[in-house]
Image: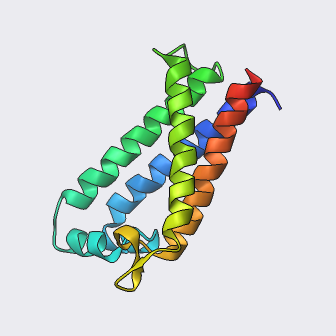
Amino acid sequence: MSGDLYFLIAALCSGVAALLHLVCIYYGAPGYRFFGAGEEIAQLAEKGSFVPAILTLGIACVLAAWSLYALSAAGVVGPLPFLQPVLVSITAIYLLRALVGFFFVRIRVRGTTVLGNSPSFWAWSSAICLLIGIMHLLGLVSK
């Protein structure tokens, strides 16, 4: 595969992840529970706190920006500032998040994993981050 295709796949994955974060905000506590965000976040949403929505919106914006950078690397949109170093940083963050997340699956605090997320959340979200990180890495290496 070409570097452009790897970056297109990475852009699609980051874009879908951004949209899923917006779905969590829309559905509130049930959405946070479904996606494994943790009971504390779900309870805050139930109580009407804006904290879960603000945090989740922030993550969605970052993921959308990362999708845009991958689209730029694939040539779908024009060149963005600092494209190469930003792509290297995005790749490193995705891969580091995957490794840390897999480590968090094994750590238990008061019957739950680190930060209150379920073990399944850490496992599947880390696998997704690993996939997206590898797509970015392959795209960088191919270009």
Camera-side residue of 17 and 132: 132
At x 74% / y 31%, what residue is drawn?
5
At x 66% / y 49%, what residue is drawn?
131
- Quarter of the picture containing the N terminus is top right
Number of marks drawn: 0
Q: Is residue 74 left or right of residue 67?
A: right
Give the percent coordinates (x, y) of residue 35: 46, 68
At x 30% / y 72%, what residue is drawn?
42
Camera-side residue of 13 and 134: 134
- Quarter of the picture containing the C terminus is top right
Q: Is residue 30 left or right of residue 134?
A: left
Q: Residue furthest right?
A: 1
Is any part of residue 127 visible from this angle? yes
Vertical placement of residue 78 versus 95, above or below: above
Q: Residue furthest bottom?
A: 111
The color scheme shown is rainbow
Vertical placement of residue 31 versus 90, above or below: below
Is any part of residue 31 visible from this angle? no
Vertical placement of residue 32 versus 17, above or below: below
Q: Is residue 53 left or right of residue 5?
A: left
Give the percent coordinates (x, y) of residue 140: 68, 27
Give the percent coordinates (x, y) of residue 106: 52, 74
At x 51% / y 75%, what residue is drawn?
119
Q: Is residue 106 left or right of residue 36?
A: right
Residue 99 found in image quarter: bottom right
